[in-house]
Amino acid sequence: MAKLYLVPTPIGNLGDITVRALEVLKSVDLILAEDTRTTRILLDHYGISVPLRSHHKFNEHRSLEAVCDSIARGTVTALVSDAGTPGVSDPGFLLVRGCLERDIPVEALPGATAFVPALVCSGLPSDRFCFEGFLPQKKGRQKRLASLAEEERTMIFYESPFRVLKTIEQLAGVLGGERRASVSRELTKKFEETIRGTLSSIAEHFRAIAPRGEFVIVVAGSSLKEQSEVNS
C-alpha cells in the first residue's frame, strides 16, 4: 500500500529514538534522508539495512514528482532529517503536500524536536508560544524582527553558531536588552548547555566565549515584560 511516513530521529543522543520509529524504519521499502552519511550512522547503530536515498533542500524540487510517483506505485517510504522531525525547519513540506495532492496517505510519528526541551527548560512561559525557526539571513530579516516587537507569546528561534551572537544582538536591539531569554546548545549531547538571563547578558556571554554547536533561542514575549514592570 502506498504510504509516506515522517520519522523523527534523535537530535543528538542516539538513544532518544522511539521503538515505533525503529519498527517503521525497518519495515519500509525506502528511506529518504537529508544527509545519507548522517542517517547511515543511525541505521548502522540499530542494524537497519533498508535502501537509503538523499532528499534535501537542494534536490527536493526537481525530484519531487519522481518520489511521489515511486510512492504511488507502492514503495512504502520513510522521510527523515539529519536530526529531529522532518518538515520542522528541515525538508519535508513539499513532499507531504505532493503526496496529499495525490491522495497518498501520510503518517507522522511523534518524536524528537529541539525546540520543545529548550522551551520547557527555559523557565519562560510555555503555555503559549510561537515558533519562528531560522530568521531570514538577508532579505526580509529586519522586517521579520520588527514584526515581533509586540509579540506577547514566548518566541523560539533556531540558529547556527556562526550567526547566533548577531541574532541575539539584533533581538536585543528590537525587543530591548533587558528582555528575558534562554539559549540552549547541543541538546541531548555531551556538552549540552543552557544560558539564561537577559538578551544583553547572554550576548555578553557569547562575546567572551565563542559559540559552538547548534542553538535554540527562547525569548520572552512582550506580555511578560509588561507584567514584570507592573510587579515592580
Image: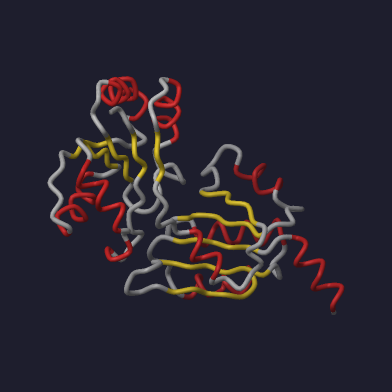
**For this view, does 41 lie left or right of residue 210?**
left
Frontmost residue, 1 versus 40: 1
The residue at the far right in this view is 230
Q: Residue at x 43, y 56 (%)?
A: 113
Q: Quadrant of residue 198?
A: bottom right
How far across and how far down the image is residue 89, in percent? 46, 45
Question: Vertical placement of 47 versus 33: above or below?
Answer: below
How far across and how far down the image is residue 161, in percent? 42, 60
The residue at the far front in this view is 1
The residue at the far bottom in this view is 232
Q: Residue at x 27, y 63 (%)?
A: 14
How far across and how far down the image is residue 229, in percent? 83, 72
**For this view, does 212 lie left or right of residue 168?**
left
Frontmost residue, 41 versus 232: 41
Q: Residue at x 71, y 70 (%)?
A: 178
In which quadrant of the rendered image does the C terminus lie? bottom right
**For this view, does 40 lie left or right of residue 99?**
left
**Colouring scheme applied when the structure was drawn:** secondary structure
Q: Quadrant of residue 223?
A: bottom right
In which quadrant of the rendered image does the N terminus lie? top left
How far across and how far down the image is residue 152, in percent? 74, 56
**How many labels were placed on the picture?**
0
Q: Residue at x 16, y 59 (%)?
A: 45
